[in-house]
Amino acid sequence: MTDIALTHLFTIKAEVDAPAQLVGAVPMGYTRRVMCVSGGQFEGERLRGRVLPGGADVVLERPDGGLHLDVRLVLETDAGELVYMTYNGRRNGPPELMQKIVNREPIPRGADYFRVLVQFETAAPRLRWLNDRIAIGTGTREPNGPVYDVFEVL
């Protein structure tokens, strides 16, 4: 079996607007929240730049408080290269902790399970290697949006 290793790709901080809530369009007992991404930044050894406005952070809240994440972002590197970034993930923990998250109250970093699976698309010649990579991340939430440490899976 081939060993799996990780290398830090970048840390990304997204800024999101207050969520719109959809109740009737989801399975019974679930709530979907759609938040518009208004900006942000990312920085790593090989990649740095900004998160462009217009992305979406879509969260499906289960009756037990667990969250399913579906996020679409466009990144622009400092060199002007565009990268489409998508990720799905899970966030969960004890009910009292999950209620704090839904209420947008601060919680200690690492108090919950917050993991994402990341993929990229780009036509930028220098960054085409991203099209063939999978990344994973671990997150936390600050008052105006999530922060992730994203790692390339080697």
Image (cartoon, helix red, strand yellow):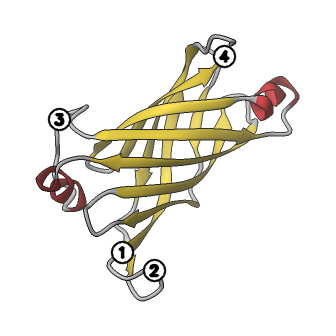
Q: Nearer the viewer, residue 107 or 63?
A: 63
Quarter location, residue 28: bottom left
N-terminal of the two: label 3 or label 4?
A: 3
Across and down, in percent, residue 6 comes to 56, 16
Is label 1 in contact with label 4 (beta carbons under 8 Å)? Answer: no
Name the kind of residue labelled 3 in the image. Answer: Pro
Name the kind of residue labelled 2 in the image. Answer: Val
Could you say which disc has been placed on residue 50 in the image?
none
Residue beneath label 3, please? 108
Please indicate whether residue 53 sits to the left or right of residue 1 in the image.
left
> Disc 1 versus disc 3: distance between alpha carbons?
26 Å
> Disc 4 versus disc 2: distance between alpha carbons?
37 Å
Residue beneath label 1, please? 30
Within 10 Å of the Cα at label 3, are there few (<14), some (14-19), or many (20+) other Cα atoms? few
Name the kind of residue labelled 4 in the image. Answer: Leu
Could you say which disc has been placed on residue 26 in the image?
2
In what element is the residue under mark 2?
loop
Across and down, in percent, residue 142 comes to 28, 43
Q: Residue furthest front?
A: 1
Please indicate whether residue 80 sits to the left or right of residue 24 in the image.
right
Q: Is residue 71 above or below residue 24?
A: above
Is label 1 in contact with label 2 (beta carbons under 8 Å)? Answer: yes
In what element is the residue under mark 3?
loop
Within 10 Å of the Cα at label 1, are there few (<14), some (14-19), or many (20+) other Cα atoms? some
Nearer the camera: disc 3 or disc 2: 2
